[in-house]
Image (cartoon, rainbow, N blue to C red):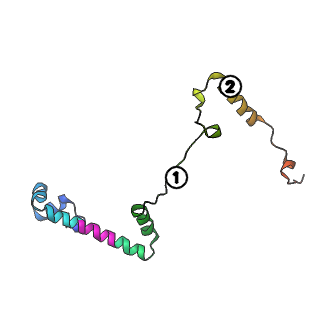
Amino acid sequence: MAVRFLSRKGIAAVIGIGQDALRKYYAEELEVGDAKAELNVRTGLYKAAKKGNVQALIHLSKTKLGDSEKVQHEHSGPNGGSVQHFLAMPADQRRAHLEALAARVLAPPPDDAADGFETEH
């Protein structure tokens, strides 16, 4: 029954004993059943991958080959230095930072002719 993934509680109920007795007297059988169940799943997964099943191939590449889709982001400040937190800056630096930001935001848009494309008016 373990080979079919039936829970310990379910197996105990089917054969009419308590879970403690099941674990005490049938520990080896449960271990073998669990191993056979895992083997059946792995065999099915392997066969699916051999037939070209993309999901099976992806799963095996992640679990057995260590592949990952995780993306690591690293942040740095100016010139690769540490990131400066705005509120941790001294007041004069914060003011200069805000003034530079305001100048960029409030600057007039660039001249369209400068990009080399002519627009019709």
Magenta stretch, main secondary structure class = helix
Tell me the kind of residue under disc 2. Answer: Arg
**Residue 71 got which mark?**
1
The quadrant where residue 48 appears: bottom left
> Which residue position is annotated with label 2?
95
Q: Residues within 10 Å of mark 2 (few under 14, many from 20)?
A: few
Q: Which residue appears at 59% of the width and 40% of the height?
A: 76
The quadrant in which the N terminus is found is bottom left
* Image spot of residue 114 (x, y percent): 85, 48
Q: Which residues are magenta?
A: 35-43
Horizontal relation, residue 3 to residue 63: left or right: left
Q: Nearer the viewer, residue 109 or 36?
A: 36
Q: Nearer the viewer, residue 100 or 112?
A: 100
Q: Which residue appears at 85% of the width and 53% of the height?
A: 116
- Let me know if residue 37 is in the magenta part: yes
* Image spot of residue 27 (x, y percent): 14, 61
Horizontal relation, residue 46 to residue 69: left or right: left
Tell me the kind of residue under disc 1. Answer: Val
The correct choice, above or below, for 8 with respect to 90 in the image is below
Horizontal relation, residue 87 to residue 50: left or right: right
The quadrant where residue 42 appears: bottom left
* Image spot of residue 11 (x, y percent): 16, 63
The correct choice, above or below, for 73 with respect to 89 in the image is below
